[in-house]
Amino acid sequence: MTKINWQERLSPAVNAIAPSGIRKFFDIAAKMQDVISLGVGEPDFVTPWTIRESCVYGLERGYTSYTANRGMKELRDEIAAHYKRRFNFAADADKEILVTVGVSEALDIALRAVLSPGDEVLIPEPCYVSYAACTTLAGGVAVPVAAKIENEFRVTAAELEAHVTDKTKVLLIGYPNNPTGAIMTREDLLAVADFAEKHDLIVISDEIYGDLTYEGEPVCFAALPKMKERTILLNGFSKAYAMTGWRVGYAIANETISAAMTKIHQYTMLCAPITAQMAAVEALRRGEKYKDKMVAEYDRRRRLIYDGFNKMGLNCFEPKGAFYIFPSIKETGLDDNTFAEEILTAEHVALVPGSAFGESGKGHVRCSYATSTDKISEALNRIENFLRKRRR
Ligand code: PLP
């Protein structure tokens, strides 16, 4: 029997991407006893009851069908009302809003809707693992732009400018940032907006952590002057409402791009699950106070973990958003992969090596503080113990 070489038969784009470095460590940790995981970027809260109940109630009433491809009208109206209220930003619920299966799908179809083979996408790094992979899968070329710890991991227009070529088509930003916890101020983003305008770029702005901003005002990139026309705004319910498993997000973009994305969505997903959409309506109608409580708790944990790392003497930038902290581990003399492996084996603490988030993440580790204060304190003790032994 002829043996098929499946590796050769896979699409070159799939062969060009590596499996996510986050999952690898998570899978190893799952097989060990007594591990404290600061590895996964997922809220430890269960979705607030009022949101879960709306889904249960929907099922009781027999809501089990497809919805409109763009998503339920009630949900699109709530999303439009939310942006009007919060940012005085107007979006047409029928033409400019598309409900997706998480931000993950929105990111994928946004890139597929706009990229031609070889188009370049500027991606400030360190960044979420999917940005470069989805760019490659869509036929584009990811162009990393290193953000520096000295600049609190904010990217500047000058740094972006240095990477522009005649193939640059898209700028893909994600602030508050996974994995660094960096935020961009209004002034920072206005400079980026000028840069996008100057080079006539499409901006994909992933604002999934927008509500998890602890210092300064959250900024919606699409709501900046003249940016609505060129921005594909991505957001969702996973993080702020503790709804990762529901798989619901959305994209707000101008009519033409939104119609193009809806076409891809209609042939691939058809629609987001109806139960998740009903829950998302409830999140926007009555979830605010529960969200605020969770955000206040993340903020407490943020200060605990930041103080802990400082006391240990690890060089660490103070995160201002999301639920990650990104200390440098260069002083240990270990590279980030070895550090993560050794601390998992010796102290049973799961962290993610910074290089999983791009070259510029090397020498750092990502710790998620979306876990209880008890576990954070215990993890800090174990990390300190590890460092003490190495420093001896
Ligand atoms: N964007 C960022 C920056 C993320 O960190 C994540 C998940 O970790 C996602 C998007 C995916 O979100 P969703 O659950 O809405 O697909």
Image (cartoon, helix red, strand yellow):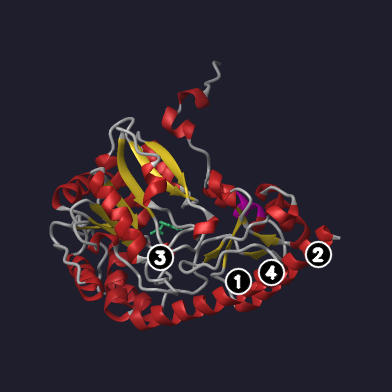
Q: Looking at the rendering, which quadrant does residue 60 occupy?
A: bottom left
Residue at which label 1 appears: 306
- Ligand 1 placement by image quarter: bottom left
Pick the residue in front: 262 or 116. Answer: 116
Q: Earlier in the sequence, mark 1 or mark 3?
A: 3
Q: How many marks?
A: 4
Residue 22, percent from left and from top = 56, 52
Q: Which one is closest to the eye, mark 1 or mark 3?
A: 1
Q: What amino acid type should be assigned to the residue bearing mark 1?
A: Tyr
Q: Disc 3 beta carbon < 8 A from ligand 1?
A: yes
Q: Residue 65 in magenta?
A: no
- Which three-letter amino acid code belongs to the residue tagged 3? Tyr
Q: Are marks 2 and 1 in contact (CB under 8 Å)?
A: no
68 left or right, relative to 221: left
26 magenta-colored? yes
Q: Secondary structure at mark 4?
A: helix
How many other residues sit within 10 Å of disc 4, few (<14), some (14-19) or many (≥20)?
A: many
Which disc, if any, is residue 388? 2
User: Which tag, 1 or 4, sits closer to the chain's start?
Assistant: 1
The residue that disc 3 covers is 209
Q: Disc 1 to disc 3, how far (Cα)?
A: 19 Å
* Residue located 66% across and 50% down the image: 336
- For marks 3 and 4, the one nearer the N-term is 3
Q: Is residue 191 visible?
A: yes
Residue 260, image quadrant: top left
Q: Nearer the viewer, residue 10 or 328?
A: 328
Q: Position of residue 298 (x, y in %)?
A: 50, 75
